Image (spheres, rainbow, N blue to C red):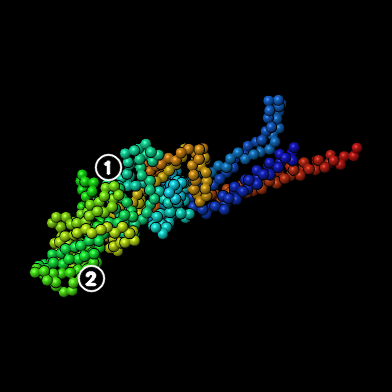
Amino acid sequence: MAFYTSLTGLNAAQTDLSVTSNNIANAGSYGFKKTTTDFGELVADSPLSSGQNIGQGTRLRATIQDFTSGSMKTTNRALDMMVNGDGFFLVKSQGASGTISLTRDGSFLTDKNNNVVTSDGNYLQVYATSNSGDIYTGSDTSTATGGRVLQNLKLPSYEDQITVSNSNSGNLIQVGSSLIANGTITINNTDGSTTSITGAQITLGGAGFDTGSTTSLSGGVMTITGGKATTTDSSGNTVGTADAINTTTYTSTNGTATVNPTTGELTGLGIASGGTLTANGNSYTGSVAFTKAITSDDSGDTSSALSNISVGTDGKVTATFANGNQYTLGAVALGDVNNRNGLHSTGNASWTTTGTSGSLLYREADTSGLGSVQSGALELSNIDLTQELVNLISEQRNFQANSKAISTDNQMVSAVMNIQS
């Protein structure tokens, strides 16, 4: 009997050693949480047994993860983030029905489509925000997210890859539908001639919805480049070369637009009444005739290229462009569960919910008690190497003691077997 009792002790010491070895191996893993073992006594019990049962060894009851925060490592990289608190980042696996996971590893990257992802390709989840940066809440607040719209965070390369769509709860920022278009521009020159530019590229940025309107925007900066220009005098005669390449850039701070309120797609462009076009320090009157929107995300006006990304403590992701315009692309979503030790570890400091952990609780940064978001920093593992090395010594002694018990039991059995009758 003692042989089998000590064997359970050997197995327990081996399991303990494996857990400690895993902790030590992941001491440098971002967001890693150390694991401890919980053992319990094995006792043979039955209604007919005496009140003086002898234990029959030990068994592993559970492995327990310690979710206390690790220390901070500063990186000064905007997409490196950590949670100053107990919350988890939410990431979604690839595919139409991707699974939401919780993670403490905030070393995010961008993929070939400018989606912000983890090292294994899971998409960082953010709450959709309004044009003013408020988290959008739909009319149905009974959903798991409380009516908040969860979406992948995608970075635009240019300002003209952003649209603002209207809703009953605010103007949502969308990345991927372009505000760039082709059109025909008519310019009234100071000498009485008229220049018509066909196939020009028109970009509108910074426009906002008109009060009470769901389709009309105004106040944006319009930039007109390219196309072919033909100038005619007051009599209609061509001046210079017809269809010459337009090398002049025209701008206007009175740009207007109309959009589809459902999709947010551009449906029209123009210049507000009384607005002027400016080029090379001169002002011109004129008009813009919308032709068609360019929907390719690869199109972009270099004057509105993305210049900076910043993340606030409230998780708001702000894009700043070369022309100075700024947009809030979303707010980093945080999550938690009622029983963290019920979470299923999937590796890379990530976990999924189970029936034991309880459902995922969707929260906001800096307001829900789960902590704030720290950009430009990463959370190190919460491993204490000194403690782990002490654990190794203790586990080695436990293994040796159980081995000695087996050896002693074997010697006793041998002694009995060698008794001369």
Percent of width and height locating residue 2: 74, 38
Percent of width and height locating residue 87: 43, 44
The residue positioned 32% from the left and 44% from the top of the image is: 136
Does any portion of residue 80 appear in the rendered image? no
Q: Badge 2 local density, few (<14 within 10 Å), some, or many (20+)? A: some
Tell which of 255 and 319 is nearer to you: 255
Residue 245's tag is: 2
The residue positioned 68% from the left and 41% from the top of the image is: 8
Q: How many numbered circles does the render carry?
A: 2
Q: Give the residue at mark 1.
A: 168
Q: Secondary structure at mark 2?
A: strand
Tell me: 4 left or right of 287.
right
Residue 310's tag is: none
Percent of width and height locating residue 283: 15, 64
Give the mark nearest the N terminus, 1 or 2.
1
Does any portion of residue 227 appear in the rendered image? yes
Q: Quadrant of the C terminus?
A: top right
Percent of width and height locating residue 1: 75, 37
Tell which of 302 and 385 is nearer to you: 302
Residue type at the position of mark 1: Asn
Residue reaching furthest right? Answer: 421
| Quadrant of the image occupied by residue 182 | bottom left
Tell which of 405 and 215 is nearer to you: 215
